[in-house]
Amino acid sequence: MNTLLSIETRNAVLLKMATLLERERAAIIAINKGDLEAYDGDDISMYDRLKVNDAKVDEMIASVTHLASQEDPVGVERFSFKHDNGMQVYNKTASFGTVLIIYESRPDVTVEAAGIAFKSGNKILLKGGKESTKSNLKIVALWHEALQTYGASTEWVEYLQYNRTETQAFLEKPTQQVDLIVPRGGERLIAFVKQHATCPVIVSGRGNNFVYVHKAADQQIALDVIENAKTAKISACNALDKVLIDKNLPNKEVFIKTLIAKLKAFEVQILGDETLAAYDEVEAIQSDAIWYQEFLDFKIAIAEIDSTQEAIAMINKYSGGHSSSIITTNENEAKVFMENVDTAAVYHNASTRFTDGGQLGLGGELAISTDKLHQRGPIGLQHLVTNKWYVHGNGQIR
């Protein structure tokens, strides 16, 4: 186990990483072009996540720079108690130790996840997808240069170039201590990790997010939110897949026709229940199984619904437990919806696209957890810690 580095060293390494990312900007983008050219799949969301351009490098630099400015998450006192016998008891945050993150196609995760783990005093093992190997190895080399600049071991950030069989073997019989595993990717990856892991796993789950347009909705807000959440970034787990429309919405036909036109401008495939399928350009839903699906594509499913209670029941049955939003001017309906929908993030009159560590004030995220233990939603710097009891005595015995 590596000895915890001082906060000054951790911050200096992060700022050095920002400088190196700027210095190597052109090289990173050029190397990433090689990964993009070698990618032979037809998954547009995978390709989108794999691509590194100037804007992505800017985000990487902003991420490590911001991390360096944040308070140390390790050693924060959470509770204190003076025992009758004079012992002084404290509970403080502590690093996990070693965190393994398994992810697909996103070279920016190699910066952000490693940065969050390192700042919170954890060693990180990075297991990226084969499609982004060249980009990832370049970024890890920069981490090692940043660490060495301040005399820190390169073991703090380690890249595991494993295929599926080697990954399974490592999960089942780790060749080094692993305290926490975070799989970031599709449902197949998550199921694979949960099946084989021998230590705790934080599930960074699927999206399949819902927007409910209540009868008292501001219809312009509803149109804007649905368009943004569906079309702004289809590869994101916070993108929108399902829309439920209150059957008592005023001027409902005009609203639905306007919504269809807006979505069709982005060439979104629209699936609808019996009522919606009567409209032009909407295909009938063939099976209820569609409600469980996360699309990660220009595709949406829309249904009419009788009430807020029915919307809550439907979301709780089908959604991925990630994000859901109600569009309404009725504060009480919003309160009922937000308290009873069982998703990590609930919204009132806003897009689901904000479920993101940076957008919710955490400065960045390791993953977005749809588990309820130990942290739900975006996992930021302050969540990548466990806790430890510090008890000071002078000979007390029980």
Image (spheres, rainbow, N blue to C red):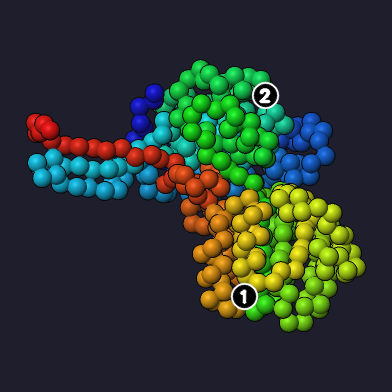
Q: Is residue 183 left or right of residue 9?
A: right
What's the residue at 56%, 34% (across, down)? 101
Indicate the secondary structure of the residue bearing disc 1. Answer: loop
Q: Could you tell me which secondary element the residue under label 2 belongs to?
A: helix
Q: Residue furthest right?
A: 280
Where the C terminus falls, by quadrant?
Answer: top left
> Which of the two residues, 242 or 234, is positioned nearer the viewer here?
242
Dot placed on the residue nearer the N-terminal end, 2 or 1? 2
Q: Which residue is mark 1?
A: 328
How far across and down, in percent of the image, does residue 116 sit? 48, 41
Residue in the picture at 57% in, 55% down: 343
User: Horizontal and vertical percent for residue 171?
Assistant: 56, 24
Residue at image location 62% in from the left, 36% down from the top: 190
x, y (%) of residue 193? Answer: 60, 31
Determine whether 219 is above or below 266 in the image: below
Relative depth, front residue between 193 and 109: 193
Query: Residue drawn 38% across and 39% down?
Result: 386
Report, in whole angstroms, how far the alpha carbon at label 2 lies from the one at label 1: 47 Å
Crowding near the residue tagged with mark 2, few <14, some 14–19, many ≥20 C-alpha atoms within 10 Å: few
Residue 326 against residue 65 in the figure, above or below: below
Residue 167 seen: yes
User: Residue 363: horizontal and vertical position, in percent?
Assistant: 49, 51
What's the mark number on residue 372?
A: none
Which of the 4 quarters of the picture holds residue 28? top right
Up/down of 174 relative to 109, above or below: above
Please give the residue where the numbered disc 2 appears in the rendered image.
164
Q: Amino acid at mark 1?
A: Thr
Q: Quadrant of residue 385?
A: top left
Query: Which residue sits furthest bottom?
Result: 250
Query: Quadrant location of residue 189?
Result: top right
Callout 1: 10 Å neighbours few (<14), some, many (20+)? many
> Which amino acid type corresponds to the residue marked 2 in the rendered image?
Arg
